[in-house]
Amino acid sequence: MAKLSFLSMGVILFLCCCSVIAGMAPADPGYSKYKDPSQPVHARIRDLMRRMTLQEKIGQMTQVDSSVVTPEILKNYSIGSVLSGGGVSPFPRAKARDWMDMVNRFQNSSLSSRLGIPIIYGIDAVHGHNNVYQATIFPHNVGLGATRDPDLVKRIGAATALEVRATGINYAFAPCIAACRDPRWGRCYESYSEDPSIVKAMTSIIPGLQGEIPAGGRKGVPYLGGKDKVLACAKHYVGDGGTTRGINENNTVTDWHGLLSIHMPGYYKAIIEGVSTIMVSYSSWNGMKMHANRFLVTDFLKNTLKFRGFVISDWKGIDKITTPPGANYTYSVQMGISAGIDMVMVPFNHTVFIDALTQLVNDNVIPMSRIDDAVERILRVKFMMGLFENPLGDQTYLSQLGSQDHRDLAREAVRKSLVLLKNGQNADPPVLPLAKNASKILVAGSHANNLGYQCGGWTITWQGGSGNNLTSGTTILGAISKAVDLETEVVFSENPDADFVKSHNFSYAIVVVGELPYAETAGDSKNLTLADRGEDIISKVCSSVKCVVVVVSGRPVTIEPLVANMDALVAAWLPGSEGEGVADVLFGDYGFTGKSPMTWFKTVDQLPMNVGDPHYDPLFPLGFGLATEPTGGQ
Ligand SMILES: *[C@@H]1O[C@H](CO)[C@@H](O)[C@H](O)[C@H]1NC(C)=O
Ligand SMILES: *[C@@H]1O[C@H](CO)[C@@H](O)[C@H](O)[C@H]1NC(C)=O
Ligand SMILES: *[C@@H]1O[C@H](CO)[C@@H](O)[C@H](O)[C@H]1NC(C)=O
Ligand SMILES: *[C@@H]1O[C@H](CO)[C@@H](O)[C@H](O)[C@H]1NC(C)=O
Ligand SMILES: *[C@@H]1O[C@H](CO)[C@@H](O)[C@H](O)[C@H]1NC(C)=O
Ligand SMILES: *[C@@H]1O[C@H](CO)[C@@H](O)[C@H](O)[C@H]1NC(C)=O
Ligand SMILES: *[C@@H]1O[C@H](CO)[C@@H](O)[C@H](O)[C@H]1NC(C)=O
Ligand SMILES: *[C@@H]1O[C@H](CO)[C@@H](O)[C@H](O)[C@H]1NC(C)=O
Ligand SMILES: *[C@@H]1O[C@H](CO)[C@@H](O)[C@H](O)[C@H]1NC(C)=O
C-alpha cells in the first residue's frame, strides 16, 4: 500500500514520507541508498558522492547570499548553502512565517535539483535571532561572560535555536569564542571575556543551540539533537581577539604557546561538545592570513584536533587573502581551498567562485581528494542533522519567536550580567538598591530611552539602530517607570541642564549613557569615549544630585576621571530587548551578582592590558563586581 502510493505519487511522497522510503528494500526501483535513513551516515555519504559530478560537488561547497540567490541558481548548481547576511531580511519587519516561506521556497528548489540535496540555511543569530523583527534580543556575549553562568548561557542557546527554527532556519553563525584582548577592537562585545577559561566555560551555548550529546554518545563529532535545534559555528578560528591595537581583521602577533593558551581553549571544548562548523578568522597569525593557513586549518584543526564537521570561510573571507581584496581571485580560491576551507561564503558572485575552483581542479592545482574531503564533511553534517528527512521548516515553531518564556530568560540574563563597580561615596551608606517609593526621580542620558542603543550592533541591521521602534522590547526608562511606585514621579530628560537638575527636588538620578551601536570594523575605537556628551551629562547630574550611572557599552570605556563624582556605577554591557532586567536589580528585587569579564583600564595608553600581565594596574580588575542583597524591592 505504502509502496504503491510512493510509486504513483512520485516526487511528493519521495520528499515527505521518509518512513515509506525507510521501509523499502534496496531492490525496489527508484531506491537510493543515500536517501535511506536506515543506512549508516558513512554509507549514505559514499553512495551520494559516487553519484555527484564535479560541478555538484563544488556547488555543495558554495554558500550564496539570499539577496542574490534564485531558485534556478540553487537547482542548476546544486548550491550547498544559503545565508542571510547581517541585517538582511525578506522585507522590513518580515514575520516568522514570511521567513519560513522564503527558506522553504529555496529549499524546494534545492530538492528539485538532480540529486535533491537540501540546503543548510545560515544566519548571524549572535544574541538571539537578531536579524528578525520582534525576536528576543539577548545580551551580547560580553554581558553573558559577566554572568559566569554557563547553564544560563546554555538555556539561551536552546531558546535561540527555537527562535531560529521559528523562521525555518537551521544554522546559526554562533558562538563567537574570541578572547578579546584589547577593548579597542570593534567586536569586543562578541567575546565572552579576555580570559580564555571564561570563554571556554561559555561554549555551553553550543549544547544549547545543537542539543547535548547524550550520555554514552560519541564526543567530538558534529551533533544535532533534533528539529528544535540548529547547527552552531565556533568562530573566528583563530586569534581574532588578539590583533595589534585591537584593529579588526588585523594581525595577531603571538608565539605558539600564546596561541594555544589564550585563543585555542574555546575550540578544544567546542569540538568535544560536537560543534558542527567552525568559521575561519579574517585576521592573520604572525603575518599569515588565517584563510590561507593550511597548518592551522588542516594540519592542526582537522588532523590533530580531529574536527570532523566542516570549516566555513567568513563573508568574502577568501577575497581578503590578497590586498586589496579580490586582487587575484583565482589565487584566493587556491589558497583558501588548499588551506582546508570546505564551504566558502562567497556570497554574491557564485559563478566566479565556481568557475575558478573548477578550473583549479581541472588544472590539477587542487587535487580531487581536497574537494572530496570538503564535500564529505558537508554531507556528514547534512545527514547527521536529519536534513534529508526534514528539509523544510516546521510551522509548529512559528510561535517561538519572541515568546514570553524567552523574554523572561533574557531578563534573567540581564539581571545576572550587570556589574556593580561602585556603590556609595567613601563612608556614605550604599546607594543601591534604590527606593521604589521616592517622590520624584530623574532619569537622564542618551541611552535611557533608546531600545536600539541598548541592543547594540547586530540588531535588525548589521550596525544596529536607534530608537524604540527598531523592534519590540522594554527600554531602561520604561522598566524604571514600571518598577517604581505609582506615586513616584519619574522625570526623564536626555540632557538636562544643571539648573533644571538643581531646581527640582529629585531624590536621586539614574544616568544612562554609553556607546552608540556598531559592528565589526566600524566599532574600532582609539579613545573608547562615551557618545552623545555622556561625560557632560554625568558631570552635570552627579554634581547636583545623588546619582547612579548605568553604562551601556560593548566593552570597558574611558570613565576613570568621572568615577569620583558618581555615587554608584553599573556596567550594563549591551543588555538587549529586556530592559526590565536592569530595573530588577537597581531596585533590589534581585541582588547584583555579575563579575567583570574584562579588565577596566584607567587610560587607553595602558592598552592592551589583561589579567596576568606583569604591570597590571587596572581601574577595576577582571572579576571585579560588588554584590548587593535582594531587598524584596523595598
Ligand atoms: C539553469 O539551467 C537551465 C537549463 O540548463 C538554463 O536554461 C538556465 O539558464 C540556467 N539558469 C541559471 C541561472 O543558471
Ligand atoms: C515546498 O514543498 C512542499 C512539499 O512539496 C509544499 O508543501 C510547500 O508548500 C512548498 N513550500 C513553498 C514555500 O514553496
Ligand atoms: C593591520 O593594520 C595596518 C594599519 O591599518 C595595515 O597597514 C596592515 O596591513 C594590517 N595588517 C593586516 C594583516 O591586516
Ligand atoms: C594569480 O594567481 C595565480 C596563482 O593562483 C597565478 O598563477 C597568476 O599568475 C596570478 N595572476 C596575476 C594576474 O597575478
Ligand atoms: C559580484 O556581485 C556584486 C553584487 O551582486 C556585483 O555588484 C558585482 O559586479 C559582481 N562582481 C563580479 C566580478 O561579478
Ligand atoms: C519608603 O519605604 C521604606 C520601606 O518600606 C520606608 O521605610 C520609607 O519610609 C518609605 N519612604 C517614603 C518617602 O515613603
Ligand atoms: C522609526 O523611528 C524613526 C525615528 O525614530 C523614524 O525615522 C522611522 O520612520 C520609524 N519607522 C517606523 C516604521 O515607524
Ligand atoms: C524634597 O523631597 C523630600 C523627600 O524626597 C522631602 O522630604 C522634602 O520635603 C522635599 N523638599 C521640598 C523643598 O520639596
Ligand atoms: C573618539 O574617537 C572617535 C572616532 O573613533 C571620534 O569620533 C571622537 O570624536 C573621539 N572623541 C574624543 C573625545 O576624542
Image: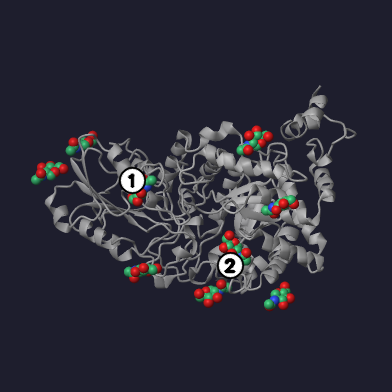
Residue 558 on image: x %, y %: 36, 65
CA–CA distance in space, label 1 to label 2: 36 Å
Q: Residue lying at the far top in this picture: please name it.
A: 1
Residue 339 position in % (x across, y down): 71, 65
- Compared to residue 144, the image places residue 362 above or below, namely below
Sequence-wise, the earlier of marks 1 and 2 is 2
Task: Indicate yes or no: mark 2 CB to ligand 3 under 8 Å.
Answer: yes
Percent position of residue 165, x then y: 58, 39
Q: Position of residue 150 (x, y in %)?
A: 54, 46
Amino acid residing under circle 2: Ser
In the picture of the structure, the residue carrying the numbered disc 2 is: 283
Residue at image point 18% right, 43% down: 440
Q: Which is nearer the eye, 591 or 527?
A: 527
Q: Is residue 398 above or below residue 597?
A: above
The amino acid type, in three-letter code, at marker 1 is: Ile
Q: Residues within 10 Å of mark 2 (few under 14, many from 20)?
A: many
Of the pair 572 and 534, the residue shown nearer to us: 534
Tell me, yes or no, whether the two marked residues, 1 and 2, touch with CB atoms within 8 Å: no
Q: In the picture, residue 621 is in which quadrant?
A: bottom left
Left or right of 84? Residue 19 is: right
Horizontal relation, residue 8 to residue 561: left or right: right
Please name the residue that numbered disc 1 is placed on.
Answer: 476
User: Can you see residue 317?
Assistant: no
Question: In what element is the residue under mark 2?
Answer: loop
